Amino acid sequence: MRFVVCIKQVPETTDVKINPETHTLMREGVTSIVNPFDMYAIEEAIRMKSRVGAGTVTALTMGPPQAEAVLREAIAMGADEGILLSDRAFAGSDTLATSYALGCAVRKIGPFDLIVTGLETLDGSTGQVGPELAENLDVPFVAYVSSIASVGDGTLECERLMEDHYEK
């Protein structure tokens, strides 16, 4: 099976500054990390690969050249490969542009069985890229997944947290 995990490099602090001219994050001098929710996504994709006994986990990110660091971390955790989409034209992309670019990359890298994303990012907290990516690729989407029981043969059995109950 082929698992694609979309991850993002985010500032390690909530004290970020916005460039008044470009309206983009000023990343200079700020330590960056893998978005914490994306760490769960990487771990789960690696676990699923182990459960099915074969396959690959591809970490995919979009960002400046230094975002390569989050791909290296994903590979150190057990991902098989990392792909960085980097171009100055991507600077300041909103969630729709980001999901479009990621969707184009997923189509280019080839067939996949499952795309895993984190809940949201620390720097934007919108939670929109995952659902927009699914819409762009015309594939099913499940949000708020807390555990995955099984994956295979075109099926996914998972549990997700709703407001007052779990749904399977």
Image (cartoon, grey):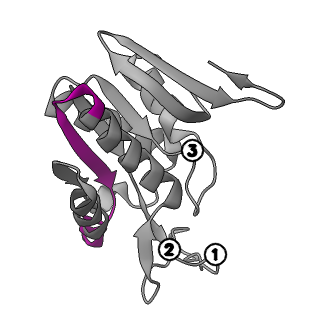
- Chain-order first, disc 2 or disc 3: 2
Q: Name the residue nearer the viewer: 108 or 96.
A: 108
- Chain-order first, disc 1 or disc 3: 1
**Corner quadrant of residue 163:** top right
Residue at x 58% of width, y 75% of height: 18
> Helix or strand or loop: what does disc 3 sit on?
loop
Task: Determine which residue is flagged by label 3.
Answer: 119
Tag 3: residue type? Answer: Leu
Task: Determine which residue is flagged by label 1.
Answer: 14
User: CB atoms at circles 2 and 3 under 8 Å apart?
Assistant: no
Which range is magenta?
51-68
Q: Is residue 9 left or right of residue 58?
A: right
x, y percentage for residue 52? 25, 26
x, y percentage for residue 23? 56, 68
Residue at x 63% of width, y 29% of height: 160
Q: Tell me, for residue 104, which label it has, or none.
A: none
User: CB atoms at circles 1 and 2 under 8 Å apart?
Assistant: yes
Count of numbered circles on the image: 3
Residue at x 19% of width, y 29% of height: 53
**Corner quadrant of residue 104:** top left
Tag 2: residue type? Answer: Pro
x, y percentage for residue 76? 23, 63
x, y percentage for residue 85? 25, 52
Tag 1: residue type? Answer: Thr
Q: Is residue 119 left or right of residue 101?
A: right
> Helix or strand or loop: what does disc 1 sit on?
loop
Vertical side of 162 occupied by 89: above or below: below
